Amino acid sequence: MRRRYLFFDIDGTLKAGGYDNAYIPESTCRAIEMLRANGHFLAIATGRSEAMARHYMRELGFENMVSDGGYGLTIEGRLVGIEPLDRELVVQLIAECQKLDMPWALQIDNSDTRVASDERFEEFTHDVYMKTRVVPGLDVKACDTIYKAYVACLSPDERRLKSLEGLPWCRFWDEYIFVEPADKGHGVRRVLDHFGAREEDAIVFGDGINDLSMFTQRWTKVAMGNACEELKACADYITTDVDKDGIWNACKELKLI
């Protein structure tokens, strides 16, 4: 069987049930096992930090991952590296947040914890996505490396932040925006280059807006049945919903298992 390079988003693609009741369908687990047995290359492709996605790798037996919105790379169980955000642009963003009195936080290491200068970010967001540690007097200019930034504000208040024009950002929750890399396609290309694989040998699976960067290349693009309409419009194949054997059905249709 021709070896293919498969990249899977997590939420809404591998994982069903939403944030509070997350689970991986049994048919997805069976498909992953059969794909591996058939010699295909398997990787997760997520916007999460490497540290926050690592347990999904363990749960499904993955050894490869594109993390941090395409800017983190793990090959054969080893973290190759994570490219940070442009530090000077983040410094400008935080200065603007301070001027507009918008609470903010930063992710300055590969962990499940962000740092904030006071309690206001947590009080505003009541967020459970990741931990927030207060570092009184935190100075963004003293941070050598910044992987992600978070700004607490309700839509459309983020339009007041002119510095966002030079940074990648998205909104997953009502209470705050994520300022983070959003080019999973960049990570997919790095993996293919690492192994000397052809673009036409790659297959990507996704469901959300942040998967659009993976849906613009010559490789095969699979959208879940529960995917957003923008992604479906770019897909080569639309499978069933994640909780209706979507991964299994796609892999059978593409003759991968």
Image (tube, rainbow, N blue to C red):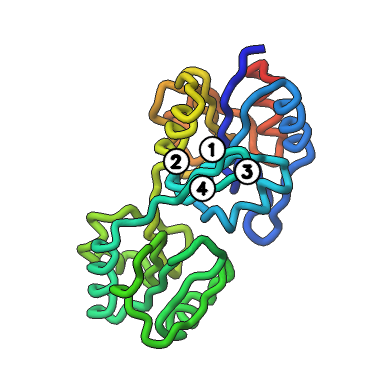
Q: Amino acid at mark 2?
A: Lys
Read off the residue under disc 3.
77
Query: Could you tell me which secondary element the residue under label 2 belongs to?
Result: helix
CB under 8 Å between callouts 4 and 3? no
- Image coordinates of residue 40 in percent, x first then y, are 65, 24
Q: Amino acid at mark 4?
A: Ser
Tag shown at residue 67: 4
Q: Residue at x 46, y 75 (%)?
A: 115
Mark 1 is surrounded, within 10 Å at the Cα level, by few (under 14), some (14 to 19) or many (20 or more) other residues, namely many
Q: Amino acid at mark 3?
A: Gly
Question: In this view of the protein, can residue 196 be seen by the observer?
Answer: yes
CB under 8 Å between callouts 1 and 2? yes
Cα–Cα gap, marks 4 and 2: 8 Å
Query: Could you tell me which secondary element the residue under label 1 belongs to?
Result: strand
Query: Could you tell me which secondary element the residue under label 3 belongs to?
Result: loop
Left or right of 24 on screen, residue 150: left
Give the mark count.
4
CB under 8 Å between callouts 1 and 3? no
Q: Earlier in the sequence, mark 4 or mark 2?
A: 4
Query: 152 or 8: which is nearer to us?
Result: 8
Mark 2 is surrounded, within 10 Å at the Cα level, by few (under 14), some (14 to 19) or many (20 or more) other residues, namely many
Query: Could you tell me which secondary element the residue under label 4 belongs to?
Result: strand
Question: Residue 150, located in which quarter of the rendered image?
Answer: bottom left
